[in-house]
Image (tube, helix red, strand yellow):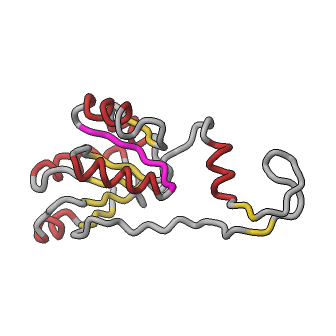
Amino acid sequence: MSVNCLTLRIYKLILRKTTLPQQKKRNTNIMGRVSNERTNFAEIVKKTTNNMERKSDIGLIGLAVMGENLVLNMESKGFYVSVYNRTVEKVENFINGRGKGKNFYGATSLEDFIASLERPRKVFLMVKAGQAVDDFIEKLIPILEPGDVIIDDGNTHFPDTARRT
């Protein structure tokens, strides 16, 4: 099974979501009223799907300081994000604390985490460089599919990246 493995040396992830431009709406708005105001369709979809089960756009493993801040940034840009940590208590604390009321899914197992992601799956690893990265990749490969992507956003030394790909 082949899984793409990338190393990012930059904190910021540049993801571009396709969003519909604001358009002049001529017939009815979401409440059924006639409206000529400009409507942001991404906002309408977000409001109407909040109560529906939805797959996450991206997932992150490792909820330390950088991991938490990165997922908060992604969520603030409109992404649905699944989070997982080896210590389940950290996931619960994040979901009930800084992530409360936001578009996060807190997974309690790797299988649950992978199942919550939209295909092709994009998995961010924000764990300590070295053996921890290798261990997580070994756990992920059997439950991922061809075309899924693992992004090692840790401080990995470049020969490790070459060895993993």
**Which quadrant is home to the C terminus?**
bottom left
In reply to whether residue 103 is colored magenta, the answer given is: no
Q: Which of the two residues, 61 or 34, is positioned nearer the viewer here?
A: 34
Q: Quadrant of residue 113?
A: top left
Q: Is residue 123 left or right of residue 139?
A: right
**Which residue is pictured at 33% across the width and 63% down the height?**
4
Image height of 102 relative to 124, above or below: above
At which x and y percent is residue 49?
64, 43
**Which residue is pictured at 38% across the width and 56% down the height?**
73
At which x and y percent is residue 1?
33, 56
Q: Which of the two residues, 134 or 18, is positioned nearer the viewer here?
A: 18
At which x and y percent is residue 78?
51, 55
Total labels drawn? 0
At which x and y percent is residue 104?
44, 42
Q: Which residues are magenta?
A: 78-85
Image height of 114 relative to 35, above or below: above
**Which residue is pictured at 33% across the width and 59% down the height?**
3
**Which residue is pictured at 85% across the width and 58% down the height?**
35
